Image (tube, rainbow, N blue to C red):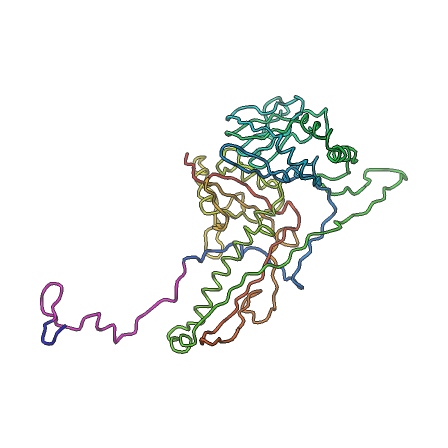
Amino acid sequence: MSAGEEVRTEQGRPQQSLGTAAARNLATTTKSVPQMQEISSRWLLRTLPWVDVKGGTYRVNRRLSFAVGDGRVTFVKTGDRVEVVPAELGELPALRSYEDEEVLSELAQRCEQREFAPGDVIASFGSRTDTVYLLAHGRVEKVGTGPYGEDESLGVLADGAYFGDGALLDGDAIWEYTARAVTACTVLALPRQEVERIAERAGSLADHLRQRRSIPRQRTNRYGEKEIDLAAGHTGEPDIPHTFVDYEARPREYELSVAQTVLRIHTRVADLYNQPMNQTEQQLRLTVEALKERQEHELVNNREFGLLHNCEYDQRIQPHNGVPSPDDMDELLSRRRGTKLFLAHPRAIAAFGRELNRRGLVPETIDIGGNRIPTWRGVPIYPCNKIPVTEARTSSIIAMRTGEEDQGVVGLRATGIPDEIEPSLSVRFMGINEQAVIKYLVTAYYSAAVLVPDALGVLENVEIGRWQ
């Protein structure tokens, strides 16, 4: 503004007092600390019982169990054509530990792709089992006969499942249930006849199948653990059975994982711009928040120890109608004793709420730290935005029993590490470089362990975008 020019207000009148823009140059503003949208409630970190791990490794000793091929099969899709990854055929019990890649590739090539519409019967109860079915995409319901002759649902299979695998070892096997497509399904069929033809030329496959047929059936309990011989209800002086409890020879060990970053702050900023807020403290605070967000993400999604990847196959269930219904949540609860909590993406919780509204049900809520948390059957349902939502608008709901005393899921960490600011989280000064930049190493150590398989269950492929 030039000298002598009169300052006017927005209404065109001459200004009669000091303006706010000029006044701010002499005033101290009231300001907030730096804000961060990434910060979430992190209920998993808050509710998981933590075990202090010495030596960086946690070993889970279990009673000896006899595992069969309870895995999932992976497929490759090219256009409309679906093929099974040959090595994944080793998930079938009959082919467990078979490693001849050439023979497995030939078996994969013999799989015939078939399409089924909703309601189509893939296999009928009582008929001969002569084909192994690999479910590439869709949902298949296993339907049995109830005690009074009515249809009874025995479960739902989804992508990656297989059924009819008994055909490879028992030529007289029959279907003990009816397999019916719930949605449009893409299935790969491997006839037993094709397997026998390949076995006639490949001696290694014939020997492997012969060996699998001759393995005596192990005496186990319903959890697959080696049975303990006991006597009960006897009188007189019968011979009491002798027994012992065997352990796994190679128990699983969990090594602590690490999340790290190097925080850099210029000395000029740290020296001159520390009023009214300490710049170093604020930089560290936001960095630690981001580190904790990543820590929770890894506890859910890491392929080595994450909850979604360490749930046993028989503890994974599929929703009967796609949406997360009260019936599905009850089924999830019934798979384990003493479920302590559910974890679900907020959109999955909303989908469950819509289903409750549709049925006229009102869930109870409990107060936890001033937050109203919805429950089902008294078990709190905590929101966790680290559980992924797929492009198909599906997600998962996790159910857990927690704590070492209850043989549940536990978090692992190491306390007492150098320069620790929180349990298992440290900030270490790394010096000042030639550019006058201060460096701090921020580190968090963590992992999670499932003590027994039924401590963790997952309701998979729940649809969160369907409105009824």
Q: Is residue 4 left or right of residue 249?
A: left
Q: Is 320 located above or below residue 301 in the figure?
A: above
Q: Nearer the viewer, residue 407 or 140?
A: 140
Q: Position of residue 324 (x, y in %)?
A: 49, 39
Q: Is residue 148 magenta?
A: no
Quadrant assignment, res 417: bottom right
Q: Is 185 located above or below residue 24 in the figure?
A: above
Q: Position of residue 166 (x, y in %)?
A: 69, 30
The tally of labels here is 0
Q: Is residue 8 left or right of residue 150?
A: left
Prevailing SS of the magenta stretch: loop
Q: Position of residue 100 (x, y in %)?
A: 70, 39
Residue appearing at x 62%, y 33% in the figure: 108
Quadrant assignment, res 223: top right
Quadrant holding the N terminus: bottom left
Q: Is residue 13 magenta?
A: yes
Residue appearing at x 13%, y 66% in the figure: 9
Quadrant assignment, res 95: top right
| Residue sitting farthest toward the right | 237
Q: Position of residue 392 (x, y in %)?
A: 46, 39
Segment tinted magenta in the rendering: 7-36
Q: Nearer the viewer, residue 225 or 120?
A: 120
Q: Is 390 located above or below residue 185 in the figure?
A: below
